[in-house]
Image (spheres, rainbow, N blue to C red):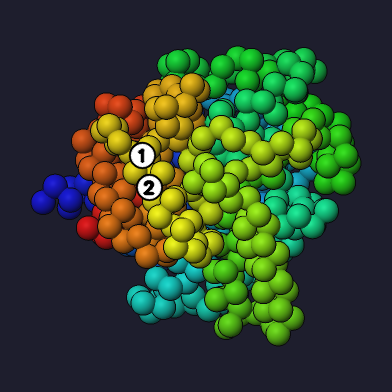
Amino acid sequence: MKKLRMEEAAHAILARNDRGGYTVPTDRLYPFQWNWDSAFVAMGFATFNVDRAYRELERLIEGQWDNGMIPHIVFHAPSDTYFPGPDVWGTRHRIPTSGITQPPVFGMALRHVHEAALASGEAGAEVRTRALFQAALRSHRWWLAARDPKGLGLVAILHPWESGSDNSPAWDEALARVPTTTTTTIRRKDTGHVDASMRPRDEDYQRFIHLVDVYRECDWDPTRQWAKAPFKVADVQMTAILARATADLMHLAETFGSEEDRGELAQMHRRLLDGLARRWRLDLSRFVSLDLISGADIEAPTQAGFIPLVAVTLDDGQKSALTAEIERWLDGMVVGVPSAPRFSPAFEPKRYWRGPVWAVINWLIADGLRLNGAEDLARRIEQVTVQAIENAGFCEYFDPTTGEGLGGDTFSWTAAAYLVLGRRR
Ligand code: DGY
């Protein structure tokens, strides 16, 4: 009964955040279409409205650049409740967009939506999947060319916002090198919607905007940006999501790709898996990102170290070490998996990506655990996620020490996570 009521509430949130075929992450705080939010939201829609799920992905692709990049924000319609808006980005796409990207969950979502369409006999699905498959393939080509020009098998982020984990302790050292000076005047709006203690600090914002200024001055040209970037991290979370999405595109390519597409995707996949394999740290029981400017491993513990589960088949030793490490992070928490563990000096249970639990991260970790045969732990993580949402509502994220719901409320991707994970119980 409760589940049914909660599902209805989740549908209502998606309806309320619908702005005409695309969904805002939440009203006011995030009033446009965000890249990875929409991919998760499409999978949520696929549980009850496959046509609308396709529409979410199609509207995101309206923002895709000619070079293949899918931007992190598509500014379909104006809003004055968010900073930085289109004027700060100064990009030149037909529809205004930001100039950076976000985790490519798109390919995973496309396979998911396509399979839901097959199961429900959705009319016109073939044509829609085919077009979106081509868009996804172009974006993966952009990733490897623009963000792995040296062929490391790892893709780099040039801005913490690209990771989706904006103020993660993983970026502390690399971001500290970025100057706080900006040519853009900073007018934060987020702290007018959500308590400042839950958001990134002002100094973080100065560095975030400094990076936007640098890249805008490069005219958003990937080669110039790569040369100028004062922040450049080969991120295991991003690479793992790209590798997993590539595997999902390989699956779709059986039907929708050419012989060449299949070969190209298989090559991309091998390259990314090789890159990820080199990022395993036995002494830490997790994968670590690489700071491409200092050349150092990023050892700060964050959820990113577990995300390669979605793409990599672990050997037995890795699997027992990594699952034991996740258990250690869950120990004593009301809700896990925290985005940073309690034993980390950086741990702040209420501040955005420095400790709080995010439903979509748990979704990825649970998927990855299941893929690697760790069914019990996968189920446990899914159950705590669903319970946290049932107790605290469809919040942006949760305090791991209390289960309290934090950040923005009525969040679209939390609603989507409930719809997908709630069915697995
Ligand atoms: C924000 O503005 O907080 C976003 O995370 C950037 O995408």
Q: Amino acid at mark 1?
A: Arg
Q: Which mark is residue 150?
A: none
Q: How many marks?
A: 2
The quadrant the C terminus occupies is: bottom left
Residue at 49% across / 62% down in the picture? Answer: 314
Q: Are marks 1 and 2 in contact (CB under 8 Å)?
A: yes
Per the image, the residue denoted by label 2 is 324
Q: Is residue 229 visible?
A: yes
Q: Amino acid at mark 2?
A: Ala
- Would you say 374 lies left or right of 168 here? left
Residue at 62% across / 25% down in the picture? Answer: 172
Residue 62 position by quadrant: bottom right
Instruction: Determine crowd level at label 1: few under 14, some 14-19, many 20+ residues with C-alpha closer than 10 A.
Output: some
Where 125 falls versus 20 (above or below)? below
Residue at 62% across / 58% down in the picture? Answer: 277
- Identify the element where label 2 is drawn: helix
- Identify the element where label 1 is drawn: helix
Per the image, the residue denoted by label 1 is 328
Question: Measured from the top left, where is residue 187 in percent x and y?
Answer: 63, 16
Residue 295 position by quadrant: top right
Q: Is residue 28 visible?
A: no
Question: Measured from the top left, where is residue 4 in percent x and y?
Answer: 17, 52
Q: Is mark 1 within 8 Å of ligand 1?
A: no
Inter-mark Cα distance, 1 to 2: 6 Å
Question: Measured from the top left, where is residue 236 in percent x and y?
Answer: 61, 48
Q: Camera-side residue: 293 or 296?
A: 296
Residue at 70% across / 64% down in the picture? Answer: 271
- Would you say 221 lies left or right of 42 here? right
> For the view shown, which residue lies furthest in the left direction?
1
